[in-house]
Amino acid sequence: MTTLFISDLHLEAGRPEIGEQFLSFLGDEARDAEALYILGDLFEVWLGDDDPNPYYTSMKVAIRELTDSGVPVFFMHGNRDFTIGEIFSGETGVEILDDPVIVDLYGQSVLLSHGDALCTDDVQYQQVRAMTRNPEWQTMMLAKSIEERIAFSIQARKDSMAHSNSVSAEIMDVNLEAIVATLRQHGTSIMLHGHTHRPAIHDVDLGNRLATRIVLGDWFEQGSVVRWDENGPRLETMPR
Ligand code: MN
């Protein structure tokens, strides 16, 4: 049996080919999986569990069909869909995970994260992250009308794009010291994350031992998946 990991699909009605591939994946390969982990940014923008967006409703129905078929599905918040909450969880049957979390995979202790918390060089982003992950801020935001939240998300997207264009790619990548500190703190030798859209497998020198960092890719041009079984992890692309 294989455990599947995906992240950074950025589903939205305006990019239907991603959703079509996701639906095929859920209805086909994922049905035979031991479990599916979605490590954040499944959705391009999540206004709140009360968003009536019919495109997202169709995705929720497909996820529910998978959990109803007996495949456990786990979700970790990304920086686009961090307000996914208990209502979504109840509708889809998905279990929401903390970031980071340690899971046991075929006898190996593995750290899972979305990855944005590791981008510590981007001080401005970390300030926004701290604000928006604050429960009081979220309660305030989710109390606004859907229209107000749409207006906020459009502005936030503009600000984020302006910021991305003003700082270097290195600044927005993960910070090696944060990686080392996180692996040491949790005593793990292997981690898996997304967010940076730079699929790769890296060695990480922890001084006394060598660790591995696996990075999932986004789904903009093709699917990206980690297939993990008793032989270990494989980072693979899924052509459309
Ligand atoms: Mn992200």
Image (cartoon, rainbow, N blue to C red):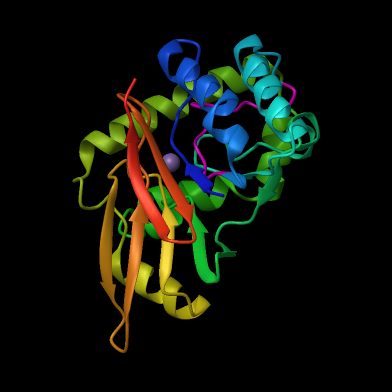
Tell me residue 232's x, y (percent). 42, 60
Residue ID at (32%, 53%) = 122
Question: Where residue 40 sits: x, y (%)?
Answer: 52, 41
Q: Is residue 155 above or below residue 82?
A: above
- Does 220 sit above or below residue 54? below
User: Quadrant location of ligand 1?
Assistant: top left
Region rendered in magenta: 37-50
State whether residue 232 is above or below residue 27: below
The answer to whether one can see residue 76 in this image is no
Residue at 24% over, 52% down: 171
Q: Quadrant of residue 175?
A: bottom left
In front of the other: 223 or 177: 223
**In which image quadrant can residue 17 be found?**
top left
Q: Nearer the viewer, residue 34 or 196?
A: 34
- Magenta span dominant secondary structure: loop
Query: Could you tell whether 111 is left or right of 15 in the image?
Result: right
* Residue at the image point whose x is 31% and y is 89% from the top: 208
Horizontally, is 58 left or right of 211 in the view? right
Specify the quadrant that holds the C terminus.
Answer: top left
Q: Residue 116: give x, y in percent of width and height.
A: 42, 51
**Which residue is at the far bottom?**
208
As for residue 119 lying within the magenta part, the answer is no
Q: Residue at x 43, y 63 (%)?
A: 191
Answer with the quarter of the image where residue 121 lies. bottom left
**Residue 97 rendering spot, x and y as whole percentages:** 65, 52
Is residue 62 rendered to the left or right of residue 80?
Answer: right
Does any portion of residue 18 appear in the rendered image?
Answer: yes
How many marks do you count on the picture? Answer: 0
User: Quick check: is 47 in the magenta stretch?
Assistant: yes
